[in-house]
Amino acid sequence: MSDTDTMPEFGKMRKFFFPIYGFEVKKALPMGFMFFFILFNYTCLRNIKDSMVITAPNSGAEVIPFLKAFLVMPSAILFTLIYAKGSDVMSCENLFYVTIGFFIIFFGFFGFVIYPNLSFFHPAVDTVARWQNHYSQSVRWPLAIAGNWTFALFYVMSELWGSATLSLLFWQFANQICKTSEAKRFYAFFGLLSQFSLLLAGEVADYIEKFSHNVPKGIDPWAVSLRWSMGIVVVSGIVLMIIHRWIYKNVLTDKRFYDKPELPGAKKKKNKMGFWQSMAFMVTSPYLILITALVICYGIGVNVIEGLWKGQARLLNSSTGAFNAFMGRYSFYTGITTMIVMIIGGNILRKFSWFTAAAITPILTLVSGSIFFSFVIWRNDFVNILAWFGTNPVVVAVFVGAVILILAKATKYSLFDLTKEMAYIPLDDEMKVKGKVVVEVIGGRLGKASGAWLQSGLLMIFGLNVFGHGKKVELINLAPYLFGILITICLLWVLAVRALSKKIEAVTATASKQAAGE
C-alpha cells in the first residue's frame, strides 16, 4: 500500500468533500460502489419486508418485535455458525460469492414463485382470525406470524442481508485491505457514495408503486411491484459480485494498494480458532465486549422508537403498496440527510477525537427520542390545537417520528458505523474476521432482539386477561414503558463509548511506541 504521508496536502474544498488522491480512486471508487449496491438492496428489502408483515391480513406493526426476538435472532446465530465454518474451508472471496448467491436466489424465488402462490402456502385469512379470537390476546401477534409465515421468512432473510453483507462481508473486506490512514479518508467517502442508493431505492419504490396501478383489472398490483423489485435486487446482487471480482483482479494485485504476500483469506492457517473459541475470546476481551455493547445499545434504542412509529404510519398507509411507497419516500429523505451529515461527519472524524464522533449518535437518539415519546404519550393534550391547524395527532406523530428516525439513521451511517469500524482496525487478522462475525451478526441481532424481547414481552403480559382484560394491546399502549427503556439504554451507550475510547487510545499509543522502537 502506498504511503501517503509524503503526499501533498489537499485544498480546503477537496479535503472537505473528497480527501482521496487521484491514484487511490482505483481502490476507493469500486469499494464505494460495493457499499452502494449492498445498501441499495438492503433499503429495498427493508421497505418491502416491513410493508408486507405490517399490512398482512390479521397483522400489524406489533408482529415486528416477535419476528426479531424469536425468528431473526436464532437465524442469525445459525448463519454465524455456518459462516464461521465456511470461513475455515473456503477463501474469503469464494465465501463472499456463496453468501451473496444464496440470498439473491432466495429473493428471486420469493418474488416469482412463492408470492404468486400464497393461497397454497398460507392458511385461509378467516382461519387465522378465528385462531386469534379463540386464544388469549397475548398470542394474537404470534398467530398472525404463523398465518403469514412466508412473509416472516422474507422478513428474516431481509434482516440477515443487512447483517451478513453490510456489517460482515463488506466491512470485513474493507478492514482487511485498508490501512488506518486510508480508513480515515476512505470510509466517510464509502458512506457518502452509498447514500445515493437510498435516494435511488426511494425513487424505485415510488415509480414501481405508480406503475403497478396501470396493470389490467384482475391482476394484483402488489404482485407486479414485488416481481419488479425482486428482479432489481437480483441484478444488483450480480453486479455486486462482479465488482468484488474486479477488485481482486485489478486492485489487490497492485502493490500500491495491497502489499501483503497473499490475498485476503486465500490460505487457511491450521491453528485457526473455531466459532466457540472465538466466541469465548470475545467474552474475555473487554475491547470486543465494548464494541458489542455499542451495537446492542443502538439496536435497542432505535427499535423502541421505530416500532411505535411504524404502527402509526400504517394508520395512514393501509395497503402494502402504499406503505412500501411511503417507506420509499422515507428512505429518499434519509439518503439526502445522511449525505449532508456524512460530509460533516467525515470532517468530525478528522478534526475531533474518536469519542466526540462516537458520542453524537447516542446523545442525539436520547434527545430526539425524548421529543417523540413526549408527544406520543401526551398526544391527547394536542388534539384541539392540531385540529385548529387542520391535522391530527396521528399525522403529526408520523411526521415527527420520521424526522427523528431520519436524523438517527443519518448519524448512524455517517458517524456510528464509521467509528465502530475504525475500532476494529487495531485488532489482529484473526479477530477482525471471527471476532467481527460474533460482534456484528450476533451483537447486531442481539441489540434488535433485546429491544424486541422487551416489546414482545410487554405485549404478551398486557395481553393477558389479568392485566389487559383480554383486550387487544398495541405498541402505543406501551409508550411510557418504552420511553423509560430508551433513556436507560442511551445513558449506558454513552458510558460504553467513553470506556472504548480509552481502550482505543491505549492500543494506539502502544502501537506507536512499537513502531518508534522499530
Image: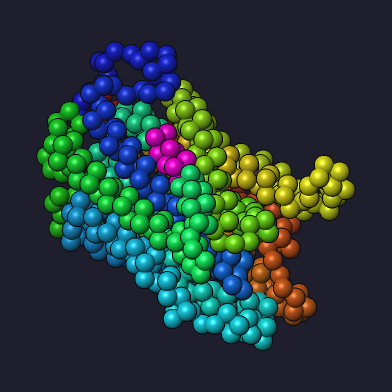
Q: What is the number of callouts on the image?
A: 0
Q: Say which quarter of the image contains residue 246.
A: top left
Q: Say which quarter of the image contains residue 159.
A: bottom left
Estimate the x, y position of residue 298 in percent, counting from the top left.
53, 49
Estimate the x, y position of residue 344 in percent, counting from the top left.
50, 27
Estimate the x, y position of residue 27 in percent, counting from the top left.
25, 33
Q: How is the image coloured?
A: rainbow
Q: Residue at x 58, y 39 (%)?
A: 407
User: Is 435 on the left or on the right of 376, as rendered?
Assistant: left
Quadrant of image for the C terminus? top left
Estimate the x, y position of residue 360 in percent, counting from the top left.
56, 35
Asked whether 192 falls inside the magenta stretch, the response is yes
Whether residue 355 is visible: no
Q: Residue at x 38, y 31 (%)?
A: 189
Quadrant of image for the N terminus? top left
Q: Would you place residue 366 above or below residue 284 in this image?
A: above
Q: Residue at x 16, y 44 (%)?
A: 263
Could you tell me what secondary structure mostly forms the magenta stretch?
helix
User: Is 515 on the left or on the right of 313, as rendered?
Assistant: left
Q: Would you place residue 223 above or below residue 235 in this image?
A: below
Q: Residue furthest front?
A: 216
Whether residue 471 is visible: yes
Q: Nearer the viewer, residue 355 or 38?
A: 38
Asked whether 196 falls inside the magenta stretch, the response is yes
Q: Would you place residue 419 above or below residue 96 in this image?
A: above
The magenta-colored residue range is 191-201
